C-alpha cells in the first residue's frame, strides 16, 4: 500500500502543497481518546526533579501511576508519585525522578497527565518504519519504549500540530535500531485530548 503525507504551506509569501509517498506492507495505528489531565499547583520544590504538589481530591491518581507534569513552557515525564490524602478537599502529591525539563518555581500552575500504554499491536522493528505521524487535539506527550521499558524516543505533541518523520528525508529515524513494544501517552490538558499515531512499516 502507498502511504502519503501532504502538507499545505504558507511562509514568507510562498504558498503551496508538499507531498511524499512511501510504500508500506502494513503498520501501526493508534487512535485514542486520552483522559483529561489533572490541574495542580507546585507547592514545595526540592530540586529540579522532586517536589510536592497539591490537587483537588477525587483526581484518581494513585501511587502506582507514572506522570507527565506539564506547565507553560515545559514538561517532565516518567515521574513517580506518592499521594497523601489531605483535608479540605485537597491532596498532597510528592513527585520525583523522570526526564525532561527541570521543575518550575513554586506556585506554578501544572497539569498532571497519567502515562498509559496505548500500544495495540505486537512488537515491531523500528528499522522498518517508513513514516511516523503523530497528532493530538490538545497538548500531549508520547514515549516509545522497548518491551523491557527502555526508552527509545519521546515526543511532545503541541495541540493540533503534526509531528512527523519520513524515510529518505535525511533525518535520522527516531526508532532505528530498536524493537518497539510499548507506546506511552499522557494528556497535558484538563479537557482531554484525541490522539492519532500512524507508523507505516515496509
Image (tube, helix red, strand yellow):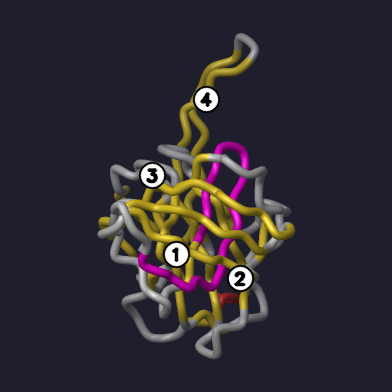
* Residue 26 visible, this orientation: no
Q: Which residue is mark 1?
A: 199
Spatial CA span between label 3 and label 1: 25 Å
Q: Which residue is mark 2?
A: 175
Q: Position of residue 3 (x, y in %)?
A: 40, 56
- Name the element at disc 4: strand
As for residue 75 lying within the magenta part, the answer is: yes
Q: In this picture, is 11 found above or below 197?
A: above
Q: In this picture, is 195 found above or below 8?
A: below
Tag 1 near tag 2, CB within 8 Å? yes
SS majority, magenta: strand
Q: Which residue is mark 3?
A: 189
As for residue 202 lying within the magenta part, the answer is: no
Q: Which of these two is toward me, 9 or 197?
A: 197
- Checking the image for residue 9, the label placed there is 4
Q: Position of residue 39 (x, y in %)?
A: 39, 46
Q: Which of these two is toward me, 139 or 8?
A: 139
Q: Which region shows up in magenta?
A: 68-85
Amino acid at each position: 500500500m502507498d502511504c502519503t503525507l501532504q502538507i499545505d504551506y504558507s511562509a514568507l509569501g510562498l504558498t503551496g502543497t508538499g507531498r511524499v509517498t512511501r510504500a508500506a506492507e502494513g503498520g501501526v495505528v493508534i487512535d485514542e481518546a486520552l483522559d483529561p489531565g489533572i490541574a495542580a499547583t507546585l507547592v514545595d520544590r526540592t530540586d529540579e526533579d522532586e517536589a510536592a504538589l497539591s490537587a483537588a481530591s477525587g483526581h484518581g491518581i494513585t501511587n502506582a501511576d507514572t506522570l507527565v507534569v506539564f506547565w507553560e513552557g515545559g514538561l517532565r515525564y516518567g515521574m513517580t508519585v506518592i499521594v497523601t490524602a489531605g483535608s479540605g478537599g485537597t491532596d498532597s502529591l510528592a513527585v520525583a525522578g523522570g526526564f525532561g525539563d527541570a521543575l518550575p518555581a513554586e506556585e506554578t500552575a501544572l497539569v498532571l497527565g497519567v502515562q498509559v500504554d496505548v500500544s495495540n499491536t505486537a512488537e515491531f522493528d523500528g528499522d522498518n518504519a517508513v513514516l511516523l505521524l503523530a497528532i493530538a487535539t490538545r497538548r500531549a506527550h508520547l514515549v516509545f519504549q522497548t518491551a523491557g521499558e527502555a526508552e527509545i524516543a519521546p515526543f511532545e505533541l503541541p495541540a493540533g500540530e503534526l509531528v512527523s518523520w519520513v524515510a529518505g528525508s535525511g533525518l535520522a529515524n527516531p526508532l532505528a535500531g530498536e524493537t518497539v513494544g510499548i507506546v506511552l501517552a499522557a494528556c497535558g490538558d484538563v479537557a482531554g485530548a484525541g490522539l492519532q499515531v500512524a507508523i507505516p512499516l515496509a
